[in-house]
Image: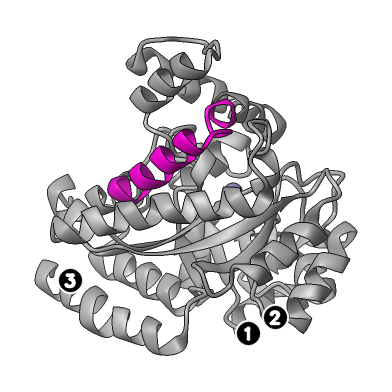
Amino acid sequence: MTAAHIDTATLRRLPKAVLHDHLDGGLRPATLVELADEVGHTLPANDPRELADWYYEAANSGDLVRYIATFEHTLAVMQTREGLLRTAEEYVLDLAEDGVVYGEVRYAPELMLKGGLTLPEVVETVQEGLAAGRAKAAAAGTPVRVGTLLCGMRMFDRSREIADLAVAFRDAGVVGFDIAGAEDGFPPADHLGAFEHLRRESVPFTIHAGEAYGLPSIHQALQVCGAQRIGHGVRITEDIVDGKLGRLAGWVRDRRIALEMCPTSNLQTGAASSIAGHPITALKDLGFRVTLNTDNRLVSGTTMTREMSLLVEEAGWTVQDLRTVTVNAVKSAFIPFDERNALIRDVILPGYEAAL
Ligand SMILES: [Zn+2]
């Protein structure tokens, strides 16, 4: 399969939407070095370039648990007001640089309490940093709409409290909820109390599922917990044989459940074995609502532009395919329907029109 090469500058200009991007997985290496110095945290490398390489190596272990362990260093600098403000502001500026026009950022407030901030203070501070980044990006002519997802950690027991936090901040930039952390051994139904509360309060949520654990995890996330989207979901392919969909795969496709797919991250954790063979392409061709995401830009050494480039170069994707997954992402964003429509009509489609 040979596809037309698309140069990086063109890919960078394409309007993008990212639904699955962790705040604590996306710091700039230079910022991490500076902030670690300020708080006295020892990093595995003190040169930003070496540090970026260290992340990439550590993340390439093929093991989700080890991949997650690399976050101790980013989290170490996200315990103070200064650290949170800076990482949140730079998060938005980096999306703008990457051509992203809509981003949902997620993080676990319960992991950011070691410096004495309370849960609401963590959320307020991150929102303040995001607002500062949005103002600068807009002033530079590259506006980015940002929504926040609050994560409960699946191996801990604070998810119900974090669900309350999501409800409390729903009119202040928080658009939804997720559970993150090790999937195997920590099934989503352990957090049913949080999900039932969110459903009663009409707050949407996504659940990481079908990455390190298979179909039962996706089934539970959708049919027991009631998730509106699935984080990763690569292993839904286990319910598709010779192009024929089983009941769960049929539910995902037919109900238009968005799959937040993250190709590079999936290679690193062993959930997929190559970009060319990553299920995102087959699922797209079968009509699933697949979306393209970065997951953790620092940890995976990636950007949306890079993920797009990999699919173009190694899986034969076209600009039309990139437009499809971008429109898919905005359709499944946790912001109001009229805003999603306006983004697609006024920003996404004209941007691709100009590139075609
Ligand atoms: Zn993730």
Say if residue 307 shows up in the picture.
no
Which residue is identified by label 1? 255
* Left or right of 323 on screen, residue 178: right
Mark pair 3, 1: CA separation: 28 Å
Crowdedness near tag 3: few (<14), some (14–19) or many (≥20) residues, C-alpha within 10 Å: some
In this view of the protein, which residue sits in the foreground, 176 or 37?
Answer: 37
Which residue is identified by label 2? 251
Q: Amino acid at mark 3?
A: Gly
Nearer to us of marks 3 and 1 is 3
- The residue located at (13%, 48%) in the rendering is 9
| Above-or-below relation of 25 to 11 | above
Which residue is identified by label 3? 351
Question: In x, y percent, where is residue 245?
Answer: 68, 75
Question: In x, y percent, where is residue 163?
Answer: 73, 64
Nearer to us of marks 2 and 3 is 3
Whether the magenta-drawn stretch holds residue 223 is answered as no
Q: Secondary structure at mark 1?
A: loop
* Residue range (magenta): 74-95
Question: In x, y percent, where is residue 290?
Answer: 50, 67
Q: Are marks 2 and 1 in contact (CB under 8 Å)?
A: yes
Question: In x, y percent, where is residue 159?
Answer: 79, 56
